[in-house]
Image (cartoon, helix red, strand yellow):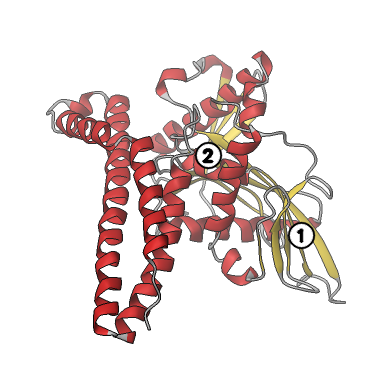
């Protein structure tokens, strides 16, 4: 006998209707039409900054509309599928409908989380830096594991990542990785990852196979926008070129195309080696520098950025936001949200949506955004 799922379907319909109202689909469709018209103008790329702003927003609006419309269509189809299963007493169709119901619940929940990304900087791309802390070579290896986790997460969602800086450690792992997640709402999505991440495992670098605790800092900032870019005097920077290393395509190590920029008044150093062209790397490094200078300026003028990003603190025990325990038991637990999972392998392989979404809800309810 088929189980009656009408109450659950009605609840999903109500939640989706609420999401549609919050996102204001009619307004989004009007905006999409306007953006498509702008994107089709012949002289659009005469102003590169304006063109990038238009195309990025166009992509974001189109994605929002397609996601909501897609879920709405699937929900309507699911009601028909359950009705068909009941009328024909078809266990195969019923099992298919039950599976789709579980998937749809997760997708509606993700859409609901998207409506929470309404902070001042949430819609921007994200600049993420991973830095090892206490723990020596194990922490350097842990920083590399975190990079792989975020890389795999972005890959699952089709989000492009640009690696701006890659400093390999001598024995294993990395000293620093800076990458940009180039997707709409990337900052709002990843802001909850900002903080210290703690790993407990049997060290692969200890010949006595002892348990080791390692730490790494994940620093997440919104990418600077042309409207709030900090002007940088050419006289106040030193530009050095060097040969690229680390991840890259064929030929990445054959020319001195990587660029390092030092901002002399503040001592801030940034580098980029993602592109083959020295000119492109310089331009990207300048964006990273402007982002860091903007962050510094805001921190000096007010506590606004601290409220947005959270505080850094020491990269050591007691300061972590999330624990990843591989020994003596398997568990990943976020100390702020209480979200936990015993599937450590999949989590480290990029299946972190549950943690990301829980952190978004936590930021919203705790008032940690400081942006409303």
Residue 149 in the image: x percent, y percent?
57, 60
Of residues 345 and 4, the one drawn nearer to the viewer in this rendering: 4
> Would you call the spot at circle 2 few (<14 residues within 10 Å), some (14-19), or many (20 or more)?
many
Residue 122 in the image: x percent, y percent?
48, 34
Q: Is residue 319 above or below residue 158?
A: above
Residue 368 numbered mark, or none:
none
Determine the residue positioned at 86% across, 72% down: 210
Which SS class for mark 1?
A: helix
Residue 357 in the image: x percent, y percent?
54, 50
Determine the residue positioned at 32% across, 50% down: 67
Mark nearer the N terminus (2 vs 1): 2
Q: CA distance from mark 2 to mark 1?
A: 25 Å
Which SS class for mark 2?
A: strand
Instruction: Identify the image quadrant of residue 78.
Output: bottom left
Of residues 9 and 253, the one drawn nearer to the viewer in this rendering: 9
Residue 127 numbered mark, or none:
2
Instruction: Identify the image quadrant of residue 4.
Output: bottom left
Q: Is residue 185 above or below residue 249?
A: above
Residue 305 in the image: x percent, y percent?
62, 25
> Would you call the spot at circle 1 few (<14 residues within 10 Å), some (14-19), or many (20 or more)?
many
Position of the C terminus, as image quadrant, is top right
Instruction: Identify the image quadrant of residue 81.
Output: bottom left
Q: Is there any visible trace of residue 367 in the rendered image?
A: yes
Position of the N terminus, as image quadrant, is bottom left
Q: Is there any visible trace of residue 254 in the rendered image?
A: no
Determine the residue positioned at 15% across, 25% down: 43
Which residue was labeled with disc 1? 137
Q: Is residue 212 above or below residue 237?
A: below
Please tell me how many numbered marks the rendered image carries. Answer: 2
Determine the residue positioned at 66% across, 59% down: 173
């Amino acid at each position: 006998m088929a189980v009656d799922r009408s109450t659950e379907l009605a609840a999903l319909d109500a939640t989706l209707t609420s999401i549609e109202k919050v996102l204001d689909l009619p307004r989004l469709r009007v905006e999409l039409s306007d953006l498509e018209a702008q994107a089709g103008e012949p002289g659009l790329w005469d102003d590169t900054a304006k063109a990038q702003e238009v195309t990025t927003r166009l992509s974001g609006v189109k994605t929002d509309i397609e996601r909501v419309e897609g879920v709405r269509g699937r929900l309507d189809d699911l009601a028909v599928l359950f009705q068909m299963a009941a009328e024909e007493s078809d266990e195969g169709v019923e099992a298919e409908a039950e599976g789709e119901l579980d998937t749809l619940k997760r997708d509606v929940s993700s859409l609901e989380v998207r409506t929470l990304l309404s902070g001042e900087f949430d819609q921007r791309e994200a600049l993420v830096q991973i830095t090892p802390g206490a723990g020596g070579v194990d922490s350097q290896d842990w920083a590399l594991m975190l990079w792989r986790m975020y890389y795999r997460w972005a890959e699952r969602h089709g989000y492009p990542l640009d690696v701006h800086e890659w400093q390999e450690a001598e024995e294993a792992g990395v000293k620093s990785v800076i990458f940009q997640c180039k997707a709409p709402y990337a900052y709002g999505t990843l802001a909850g990852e900002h903080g210290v991440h703690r790993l407990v495992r049997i060290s692969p670098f200890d010949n006595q196979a002892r348990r080791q605790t390692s730490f790494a800092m994940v620093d997440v900032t919104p990418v600077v926008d042309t409207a709030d870019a900090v002007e940088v005097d050419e006289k106040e920077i030193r530009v050095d070129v060097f040969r690229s290393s680390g991840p890259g395509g064929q030929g990445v190590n054959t020319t001195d195309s990587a660029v390092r920029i030092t901002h002399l008044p503040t001592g801030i150093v940034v580098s980029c080696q993602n592109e083959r062209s020295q000119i492109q790397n310089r331009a990207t490094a300048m964006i990273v520098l402007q982002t860091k200078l903007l962050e510094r300026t805001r921190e000096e003028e007010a506590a606004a950025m601290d409220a947005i990003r959270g505080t850094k603190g020491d990269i050591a025990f007691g300061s972590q936001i999330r624990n990843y325990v591989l020994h003596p038991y398997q568990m990943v637990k976020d100390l702020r949200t209480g979200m936990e999972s015993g599937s450590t392998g999949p989590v480290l392989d990029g299946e972190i949506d549950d943690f990301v979404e829980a952190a978004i809800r936590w930021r919203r309810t705790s008032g940690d955004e400081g942006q409303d």
